[in-house]
Image (tube, rainbow, N blue to C red):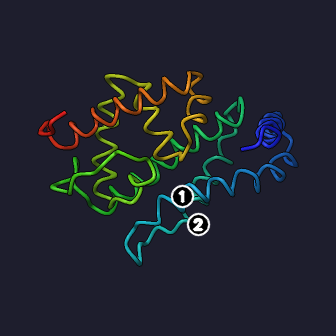
Amino acid sequence: MAASLTHEVTHLLKAWTAGDQQALERLTPLVYRQLHRVAQRCMAGERPGHTLQTTALVNEVYLRLVDCEQINWQDRAHFFAVSAQLMRRILIDFARARGYQKRGGGAPHMSLDEAPSVCHEPDANLVALDDALKALAAVDGRKSKVVELRFFGGLSVEETAEVLRVSADTVVRDWRLAKVWLLRELSGGNCGA
């Protein structure tokens, strides 16, 4: 994202926090497009006829964000970090509501080699991933946050580093270690890592 657009989003978020509703109107198309791209990528691998559509997911995230009047938006990175958390909650709640068992219930193994490919797994894997992320958060919160931002938020390594206020090298290292940890967790400790 261009530096000027990043600065504009941050400026509009702060104005919105201060009560400027016109700032929200100008902010909406800027953030909505990025939220839609992330949701579209996450929903692309779902089965045909999936009842949760991309636009519905984005709208739900957006409605929850607009209702968050008590949040003091710091910058664009903070906004997309919160968006990633909301998208995760919505997707997991949807998967759980569909009656999938905890921990995957015999679901096929999920590869965490690349963040975009993780989004294409069935709902049962999302539930298993959510459970594993909660366990990882208890051990190492930052690594869990890296996975959440990259997977659910669709953020790049650089954007994730900006959100967490760490170096890109730290994000890459955390991402690599989190993938190994999660793979072991999701496979019931039976992987060769």
Q: In x, y percent, where is residue 94?
A: 40, 58
Of mark 1 and mark 2, the one earlier in the sequence is 1
- The reply to whether callout 1 and callout 2 are in contact (CB within 8 Å) is yes
Foreground: 21 or 131? 131
Q: Determine which residue is flagged by label 1.
A: 39
In the rendered image, the vertical position of residue 166 relative to residue 119, given as above or below: above
Kindly identify the amino acid type of the residue bearing the numbered disc 2: Thr
At mark 2, the secondary structure is: helix
Q: Determine which residue is flagged by label 2.
A: 55
* 127 lies left or right of 164: left
Q: Residue at x 76, y 56 (%)?
A: 29
Q: Residue at x 43, y 47 (%)?
A: 115
Report the quarter where the C terminus lies.
top left
* 157 lies left or right of 189: right
Q: In x, y percent, where is residue 31?
A: 71, 50
Q: In x, y percent, where is residue 24?
A: 80, 48
Q: Residue at x 28, y 57 (%)?
A: 124
At mark 1, the secondary structure is: helix
